Amino acid sequence: MLAISIAAAMPAAAQEKPSSLGLGIFTFTSGPAAAYGMPGKNAADLMIDEINAKGGIGGVPVSAIYVDEAQGAQGVIAEYRRLAGEARNQVMVAALSSANCLALAPIAEQLEVPTVGWNCDTHQLLLDGKSKYMFRPSGNTVPEFVAYAAYLLERKPDVKTVAIINPDYAFGHDAATIFKAALKALKPDIEVVAELYPKLGSPNYQTEISRLTTAHPDVVFSNLWGADLENFVRQATPRGLFSSSQVVLALGETVLQRVPLPDGVIVGVLGDGWWMSPDAKANVETTKFAAAYKQRFGEYPVFPSIKMANALIYVKAAYQAAMQKNGGKWPTRAEIAEAMKGSSVATLTGTTKTRADNDGLVDQIVGVTMKTEGRSFPLIGEMARYKGDSLMPAPGQDPIAWVSTLKPEFAKTLSKPGSYK
Amino acid sequence: MSNTIIPLLLDSLASAALIFFAAVGLTLVFSVLRVLNVAHGSLYSIGGYAAASACLFIASKQLNPYLSFVALLFSAVFVAAIFGPLIERSLIRWTYGKSEAVQILITFGIFLILEDLQRMIFGVQSFYEDTPTRLLGTSKIGGVVYLNYQILLIGLALLVVIGLRLLINHTRLGRLITAVVTDREMAQAIGIDTNRIFILAFSLGVFLAALGGALATPTSGIAPGLGADTMVLAFAVAAIGGLGQIEGAAVASLIVGVARVLAIYLAPSLDAVAPYAAMLAVLLIRPYGLFGSVTARRI
């Protein structure tokens, strides 16, 4: 332990430019979650190549060391400690799984390694407001799932009954808690008629589909993702679920290119990472990135890809800011963390602002699937772009309690479906 | 509740059919070879990958889509013909007569190799091919739209139970297998080629595993991790039914299917534990499973 601590402290003293900058990047490269994790890794490969083609960061080429999160929290922690012990690995981009994010956050503080949560959505991550080294520039579950409730109630104001099918772990349960709390606050007469939590990685949802059908809900809400979402959509479509209920798929954008989703499904991207949004299309870097991604990996980037790319842009911006501040010297880990705090970074799809509690303010995009000429898969239309700060409680405020205080009038102050063009 | 009884029963049968396909090969192999094959789940998922690949090939070449039904069957035959003799002769044979610990270590090693092979060949994305379900269409039963393919699966599971019983009781191969199961040394003494019986029985087990994976493909996704899930469920079914008992596997599949469906309908938070709660309940009353016993051996 002492040796690791000493090694971890070394970069604070070493400010010579290294021959290369190592980034520890944590994502799922195996198991069912890889369907979500690999688009993140692909984006990191592409973005790092682009950064290096432009001379690296401060003239130093970047190299990624990937850690597979499928090995479980203990393995991920051990890998994090091992990477942190090497001076050249100054920043970690970790992680995809909220459970791993929660496990790594205290270690980031202990070892004083700037750690960027590229997909740490859980609202529990930065609750204490004391983090110095853990950053989340990619949004969290509170604005994400309040946005779905607001969008749904604007689009379908007569909704009476809702059924939920979410994966059986923290992300699924947290999302259901926030979504239910938001619905109850914004339209108190809504009844939740079924709540299902199938095991993460389930290949077969036939019984769940029957159960949802027998509940006759106006709305089916789900934050299934990866292979689970793909399987659910493929199995539910022929059984008529999409025609008997309004379906909301919180991570629906990730399967648009792979599964024939019908028109009118409410889908989102958990943040602003839609490569076809008006802001994204207006950004030359984004269109170049999407085209290069398509050419290299055969599909357009999905929002986990954009989240990863934005996380690396965030890291690069922190280096540039830190070096500008210290007179062009190679920054220490502490200086990089300091540069991240309070930063405002232009990403591929918008702007991420880092608050004093290291939480990011990111806009939320929600829309519905619709066929578009010239594309073989449905795109997202009728979009609303919710301002990040409008759906976030103040630092230190209990998020669930804050959601419960929302009033129906609050929804009237928000963007309307179709207003983001 | 009254308006959900028919969907509940139908879902239980459909769920039991899929579980039975996953478990019956495992129980057959244990019955004949006395080997607990931990790699069984991987062979199930390989059957799924093979079937999905064959169906996707048929679709890409715009061949007659009804060939996809043939593809489901032949992909299982193909997997059995390749992996059955290969695994039995190369590794499983070294476990005969060894302790359960050695058997589990070796078959777990096979499981790991097969899982890595699948990842190398098929990648990490989910595979899905639903041509057979689309061809058969849907029916509305009890207010719920079902895939006709789900009804077909229930019938196929029954056919497999009957087919295996006929094979064992009314064919020469079945009698030879029974002789080997009853007394391996005596069977060898009267001139039965037990090596051949073992290859055939193991390959039949691989065929049933691969058939389960292949038949599941049109209604389920195939992705890394399926093998491990299948293996655990198959072991639970084998334990409930009694190790090596084919009828036991059928009844146990029904119990697990009913338990899981009841949980989803009535107590969703118990969904994941329902099969194992059922296993615990049965084993507390009958520690050797419903059809198992300490001494007698039947298949």
Image: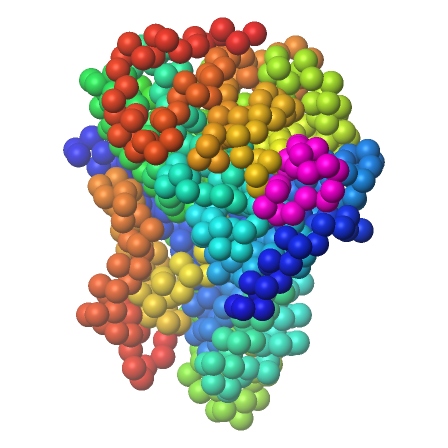
Q: Residue at x 39, y 25 (%)?
A: A392
In the rendered structure, does residue B271 fall within the stretch colored magenta?
no
- Start-end of magenta stretch: A315-336
Quadrant in which the C terminus of chain A appears? top right
- Judged by its main secondary structure, the magenta piece is helix
Q: Position of residue A364 (x, y in %)?
A: 48, 21
From where the camera sits, is residue A16 visible? yes
| A267 relative to B259 in the view: left or right | right
Q: Residue furthest front?
A: A327
Q: Residue at x 54, y 51 (%)?
A: A112
In the rendered structure, does residue A327 fall within the stretch colored magenta?
yes
Towards the viewer: A329 or B297:
A329
Instruction: Work out whether B72 lies above or below B206.
Output: above
| B165 relative to B93 in the view: left or right | left
Q: Position of residue B34 (x, y in %)?
A: 46, 78
Q: Position of residue A9 (x, y in %)?
A: 60, 58
| B56 relative to A180 in the view: left or right | right
